[in-house]
Structures are given as structure tokens and as C-alpha cells.
Amino acid sequence: MAIIEVQNLVKRYGDHTAVNGISFAVEQGEIFGILGPNGAGKTTTVECVEGLRSPDGGTIRVAGLDPQRDSDELRQLLGAQLQESELPEKMKVREALELYSSFYRDPADWRELLATLNLTDKIDAQFRRLSGGQKQRLSIALALVGNPKVAVLDELTTGLDPQARRDTWDLIETIRDRGVTIVLVTHFMEEAERLCDRLAVVNAGELVALDSPAGLVARVDDRQRVRFRPSAPIDHAVLTALPEVMSVERAGSQLVVTGTGNLLLAVTTELARNQVVAADLRVEQTSLDDAFVALTGRTIDA
Amino acid sequence: MSAITKLTMSETRLFFREPIGVFFTVLFPPVLLGILGAVPSFREPDKGLGGLRVIDLYIPIAIAMAVALFSLSGLPQLLATYREKGILRRLKVTPARPVTMLGAQLLMCTALSVVTMLLIVAVGRIAFNVALPDQIPAYLVAYLLSAVSMLAIGLLVASLAPTAKGAGAIGTLLFFPIIFFAGLWAPREVMPELLRKISDFTPLGAGVQSLQDAATGSWPQLLHIAVLLGWTVVAGGLAARYFRWE
């Protein structure tokens, strides 16, 4: 069942149309990514879902609620982690969680939340004393403290170091396992690929594609390349005879086999039958980056 | 406990973590009164002041100063900082709503400035034998009208200032003329006629006179009540129209 439904969403700022007819549905319990370059309309889209902005056209339903009309009810079941949203410098972690949990009808146990987020030892630290990663985790905690059904996380890992970023990803999966539907706004390919069940690729205010990360890649190009150094010479014809194989090329001491489907299994099985061992074996696939460029005609950082 | 109570308590706790802010807004006006009272001639009755002493006149002026400090230096800068840092925006996605923060700030400022007012009255009574106000209800009404009109002006500053720094600057810029007309440098009693006429139409000029009238046993003049209400309605209305949460 779709917990979020967005239909033909339009949002204009003056002459500029930030979002131009975007539609998608988010299923309960999934991690749904909104991927796109800066200025693509990602944040505007989720701000409409959060009820922070009123759409100029289209309809939005979150668990059946209209974010504009049923704003009070929406806030009880939607938690949001906003870009660049701080706390008073001298507020302590404990105080922030006590305060924010008091706003909700049925708050989560914030101590448990802190433990999950690895912040228990920072409970008496003031906000200004936290590192970037700790601030970000606190911000996630505040988004979850109301026991939301849906959590919207906007540019969650921007500004974090690689380790903190990976830790945060693990955390998001933990949260999803608690049954929270997650909408993740990102412009990090790796993050989208690693976390999201499905991705909405947004460019210039329009939805370009909506699929699983693997589906997006396959849509653009499902060719793969298997590259290896054969232990003994092998007749190319043996490999080209396989239905999965499109071409075989020699590159120095290596063979590069291009094909589709379960290429790796087909090639290695055939090699084994011919008593050839494949050394330095590598599989190259079209990446989500490649898919993104193909879908939007630009790289994500451009 | 309701969100506004929780938020007011939280904001008050944060306020007390800024010792410099606490000193200037809560303690400075009573301290200033103490310093003025240490001047012997200010404790002598003055025929030019209708037999009052200078120190008597400075009780409402010190109270006006406390109100001005809270509403012009404390409130706008804090709200603008909260806007700049996205704190108001964060509240917007919770059931608390940012308007609760506004309410919490106003409650805190009012409560703390009441404390300052009581301190000033107590210092005056205990140290300098200034009589307690004759008309206590009138005194409280005059006080509240003054505080509310100044807080409305503070909110307007917070609404119009683009940044926290801007809010601080505009607040300070307004502080001096407003407190001048309240009589900090020359009490209304010794102001030239023209200045006193202008002072009648400023929030704290009207406020100080209303407090002084209540102290000596009469209700505030209609003109001054109208002036205080007028500032509240105009500044509050404009603030409501122009306040931005982000």
C-alpha cells in the first residue's frame, strides 16, 4: 500500500518552475530515494510532502492526509530531518530530546533512540560541542522522536566524512527495520545505490525515471564486461558460441568478453569445461553514474 | 505539560546559560539605580521636581530600561538567530509549530522583566526609601502595557531584520532614542516642553509617565494608554504581517 502519493506536483517560485508535474508513490516500509543534481527540485518536492510549502498544482497524500489541510495530524506521523537546521548552541542533547519528544502524542523512547544512534555518551553535551556527524545523528534522532510512520531525510550525509557516512547508512537500514518508511533526498550516487529500494531520478523539475537502482542501470544498458587472463590459450569461438556473449576481444594478455544476462556464470562454466583458469577476473557493469548521465544528459555534480 | 510551557522553560534555561546576557538584561537596571542612588544630592528632595527626589524619578526609568533591554536587545536578536539557524524551521515540522516559540519567548521576556521590575522596586524601597506605588493595580497595568508595546516593537525588529547581526544593530539603534525619551539622561520632569511633548508619544515616554502617575496614586492618563496601545497594535500588526519563519 502506498503511504505517500504525489500526483502531478507543480511548484513555482515567481517565473521559475521548480517542480513541473512530478508523480510518484512510496510504498510502506521502503527506502525511497529522490536523486538529482542541485537545483533539480528534490528539496522543493519533499518540502511540499512535509507541508512546508503549498503546491501550485497536483495532489499529495501522506497516509491519506493532505499536508496542507491536515497539517496538525501530519506532524504527528511524519518526521523530517531538514537541511541546515541547527539547535540553540547551548542546548544539551538530553534537553533537545526531552523537549522535542514532549511535542508528540506518542513519542518514542528517546534514550533507546540515542543508544541506536550511538549518542548515549553525548547525552549531556551541548549542541555546539558536537561533531558534524554527531549533530547529524542528533538531527535524525529528533526526526524520529515522535515515532513517525514516515521519515524524510534531506541530504543526510552531506558534509560527513566517509566513515561517518557509512555509519549513517547502517543506521538508516536499522530505522527501516523498525518499520519506518524513509524518503531520502540525495545527490550521492553511492548512497542511493547502497540504500534505496527505489529511486526517483529528478532533473530540472521533472521525473526522469523511477525504478530500483539495478533497474535504472539495466534500463540504460544491461551490457557487462568480464575481463580475465586465461591460464591457457582458448579459442574465441568457444566463447562467442555462448548465447550470453556478444563479443570477445583480446587486450594484451587479457580477454574482454562483452555480453548480457548471467554472463559471468556462462563464461566461467565454459572456461572450466575447457580446463582454463581465469586469473585476475573482474566484472564491469554500467554504474548508476553512467545511468544517471544517460537519463539526464548531465553528471550529477554539474 | 503543554509544548509552550516546556518550550518556555527550555528557553529560560538557555537564557541563564548566557551570563553576560543575564547581567545586562536582569541585573544592570537595578545596579544602575543603585549607582544613581549613591549620589547624595539625588537623594535630596528637589523643589524643581515638586518635592520629589531624583532617585524617585529613576525607579520607572530603570524599569523602562529593563523593558527596553529585553525587547530590543534580547528578543529580536534571539529570534533572528533562531531563524538564521533553521531552529524555527525545524519546529515547523513538529506538532509544536514555530509560533509556540514566539509565545515562549514573549512569556519568558515578560516573566524575567517582571522579576527585574520587582528587583528595582525592592532596591528603591530598601536602599533609598522610595515609597511603594500607591496604586498597585494601576502600576501593574502601566507596566504590562509598556512591556507589551515594547515587545511588539521587538518582534517587528525581528521581522524586518535580514540577519541576527542586523537585528542586533537595529535593536541598538532604536534603544537609544526610545530610552532617551523615557528620560534616562534627563527625566521627563526636567525635559524642555517640546521634548516632553514628543516623549508623550513614544512607548517608554508614555510608559514611564504612566508608572510615575500610578506610583503617586493616580491612574495613567488616557493619552498615554492610547499611545501604548497604539504602538502595540501598529508594531504587533506589522510584525504579524512581515514575520518570516525562514
Image: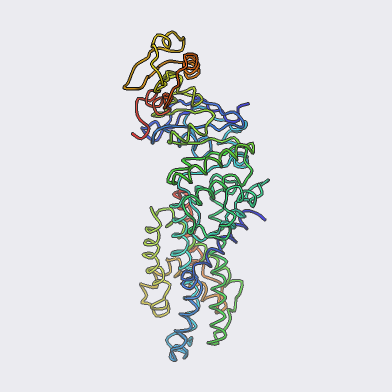
Residue B227 visible within the image: no
Q: Nearer the viewer, residue A255 or B225?
A: A255
x, y percent for residue A110:
63, 51
x, y percent for residue A39:
38, 35
Q: In the shown orientation, is residue B145 left or right of residue A36? A: right
Q: In the shown orientation, is residue A120 left or right of residue A263? A: right
Above or below, comparing residue B118 to residue A178 in the picture: below
Q: In the shown orientation, is residue A190 left or right of residue A143? A: left
Q: Residue furthest left?
A: A252
Above or below, comparing residue A279 to residue A275 in the picture: below
Above or below, comparing residue A221 to residue B223 in the picture: above
Q: Nearer the viewer, residue B105 or A263?
A: A263
| Residue A180 figure quarter | top right
Residue B224 visible within the image: yes
Above or below, comparing residue B22 to residue B122 in the picture: above
Looking at the rendered image, the quarter that the N terminus of chain B falls into is: bottom right
Please report the residue visible at 50 percent of the width from the left and 14 percent of the height from the top: A273
x, y percent for residue B167:
40, 59
Q: Nearer the viewer, residue A140 or B88?
A: A140
The way the protein has been coloured in the rendering is: rainbow
Q: In the shown orientation, is residue B56 left or right of residue B135? A: left
x, y percent for residue B214:
55, 75
How many marks overall? 0
